[in-house]
Structure formats: structure tokens, C-alpha cells
Image (tube, grey):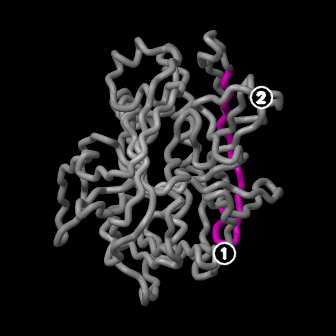
Amino acid sequence: MKKFLLFSTIVVFFCSCRTIKGIIQTPSAIKQIDFALKGVRMAKKTEKTYHYGKKSPFVFAENAIFIPCKINDTIHLVYYDSEMSGVSITHGLLQEKIPGNVELPKSVKTIKLREKKKKNNSNHRIVVKSGVKYYDIESDFFYLKNLMGVVTSLSNDTIISTSMPEKNQNRFTIGDDVLPKWKDVMLLSFSDTTITLLDSVAAYDTTGFTFVKSLLNTCEGLVLCLTIDSIEYAFVFNTGFNGYLSMPQYAEHRKYSFVDGEFKCDNFYVQYEKHKKEDDTTITIYREQNYSEIINGITTAKYKKQNYSKTVIDTLIVQQTNAITIGDLDFIAGNIIYKKNSTRPIVGMQFISHFDWIIDMYRQKIYVKQINSIEFK
């Protein structure tokens, strides 16, 4: 029975939607499993306290949300990435990154991985060190004691690793496992750059807001339904994406929703030709494909053969349009990037920051209010 429970835990960890990307090298899988399971056990000891009904300011800079927090008695601006979720090699409930020449802080458990990167036609080995440890973090609207976090460093800071976030090179990052708390309400207001948390029984005013068809789940987080050229798609709400809207050029996905109290699943297809415009701009870029991108959407057997980085060609199509609809708001203008190598439609900060948001986790409802006009860039 114990063996079965352990096996089930491991399967859940590796098959969860957003933690699988933390696996870097198959030969060290046992160490990674042990490291991750330690983090899972530590996460159970976290004590969370939330302060409801108080407007708390955040810093909006470089199309990113930073929350002033005291971490272990020092004030930091903590980057809020709604797509960071789950316990993996590089992601805890809190993620800290430090330079490779700084000694890794004392941790409950550590792991060292060697990642091969290709640079200037030669292979380089980067040593990625990670440690799982407890943090105490406090802001104006939450206090988290014994928060399980992962601290990570690189042996060579001149090479960007797949294991480290690039956004703003900020030291600390939190995701939607911390904010907002499941079954609470978050008022995310860019009109006055504040966040307000409400508990599940609190009432809120939706005057001036429009209802948005959406779904909140533990697999993909917050998903919004937007209409492009009268075709509805399910977009992932991602504060870690700097752009406006991003879509695959060709893809098939499922869209989950609740209709009349019943769970419903529909397939939807993205085909660029349905949205093609005369003024679209095609850009060809060369980039290095990393381990996270390799593992997504392919079998383990194929992954085992792909144990190196390689240069790949990607094609981006940049489109300016005014045929975007969200809720009852029509003719919204903005830029859409259609990516050849992409998996899901994504709504990013250039779009998100033009609205005030009511994110009701408890009632599974989202409301938005446009706060300024959106111009082409």
C-alpha cells in the first residue's frame, strides 16, 4: 500500500500540467524526484494569513507587477508571475535566484544538475544548483510563514539557463499558488495600481464592469475567452508574458467551461488563415531550443534522445487588428503575435494592464473594466 501511495505521488507530480517542465535531465530523475517530494512535504507546513478588504499598492514597471514584501526581515520587490505554479526543480511556492558566484544559502535539501548549452558552435556545461528552504514573507495583505521556496544559482551567469527566469532579472518570484488564495476574490486594479483581497462571502461592486466567460482550474490557472474576428478562443491569463496577445499559427486545444452547472469540454482550432490581414508582418528568428521546450508535448522516449540544445528557426507573424472582443467590449485594437512554435493562446501584460479586474475564484467569475484606450504599437 505504501509503495502504491508513493508511486501515485510521483505520477501526480510528473504528470501535472505545469510542473513537468522542471525536469532537465533523465539520468538524474531519481534525485529530482527525491528533491521535489521533499518540497511537497515542506509545503504542507506553510501557514498562510490573508488580510481582507484593504487596498494594497503594487509597483507596475516594465509591463510587470512587483509586490513590496518583507522576506526574512528585508524589503524586496517580488515579481508576480501567475504562470509559476507547483513544486518542481526550479519552482517552489517562492522562487529565489542568486548569481553563480554567491554561495547557495543553507537549505533543507539541495540538488546539483549539469545542463548542456550550445554557444558559439561549442558545447558548454552549466552547473545548476538548487536548494529547497523555508521563507517568511509579509506584504500589506498577506503573511506567509514557513513558505516553501526554491533558491537557484548558475555556475556561469553569462549564459542564460532554461532553469532561470529572464524577466527583469528579479531575485524573488511568486505565482498563483500564493496569490490569490483559492476560493477568494482578488481585485487587480491598474487604474490605481492596487490589489485588494476579499474572502469568499464578501460582496463587491461590478458597476462599470463587464462579465467575461472564463474558467479557473488547477491545471492551467485562469483562462479567459476572447473573440478574434468573431471566433472564440481560450486564452491563458499570464502576468509573466510581456506581450499583448499571442496565438499559435496552427493548433488544436480543448476549452473547458461550466454551462448551467454542468462541466463542458469543447475542442477549438487555431488557424492563422482565418485571421490573415494584408498588412501582417512575417519575422523569421533563430533561437536556441532549450530543455523545457523539448519536453513539452512529446513522449519520454523521444525526450531521452534530445539531450542537447540546438538552434531552431521560428516564424512570427505580427498583426495589428481592431477585431478583438472581451465580454461586451467590442472592436478592441492591439497586436497579435502568431507563433509557429507555440502551444496555447496567451494574454499578456500589454493587454492585462489596460483593464481593472475582478477575479472571483470562489464563484468562478471574472469581470473587467477598460480604463484607457489601446493604441497600435
Query: Residue 295: x, y in percent?
Result: 41, 27
Within-10-Å neighbours for mark 2: few <14, some 14–19, many 20+ = some
Can residue 283 be seen here? The reply is yes
Front residue of 22/317: it is 317
Q: Residue at x 27, y 61 (%)?
A: 229
At label 1, the amino acid type is Ser
Front residue of 220/209: it is 209
Quadrant containing the N terminus in the rendered view: top left
Q: Residue at x 40, y 76 (%)?
A: 367
Q: Residue at x 42, y 40 (%)?
A: 282
Query: Residue 46: x, y in percent?
Result: 60, 54
Image quadrant assignment for residue 193:
bottom right
**For the residue labelled by badge 2, is the local secondary structure a helix, a strand or a loop?**
loop
For marks 1 and 2 on the same chain, the one whose residue lies earlier in the sequence: 1
Q: Residue at x 18, y 53 (%)?
A: 266
Give yes or no for residue 136 being in the magenta stretch. yes
User: Compared to 227, does 52 lie above or below?
Assistant: below
Q: Which residue is mark 2?
A: 100
Query: Residue 256: x, y in percent?
Result: 25, 56
The disc label shown at residue 131, or none = none
Marks 1 & 2, CB-CB < 8 Å contact:
no
Query: How many discs mark residues in the rendered view?
Result: 2
Give yes or no for residue 302 being in the magenta stretch. no
At label 2, the amino acid type is Gly
Region in magenta: 127-143
Q: Which residue is mark 1?
A: 56
Image quadrant assignment for residue 149:
top right
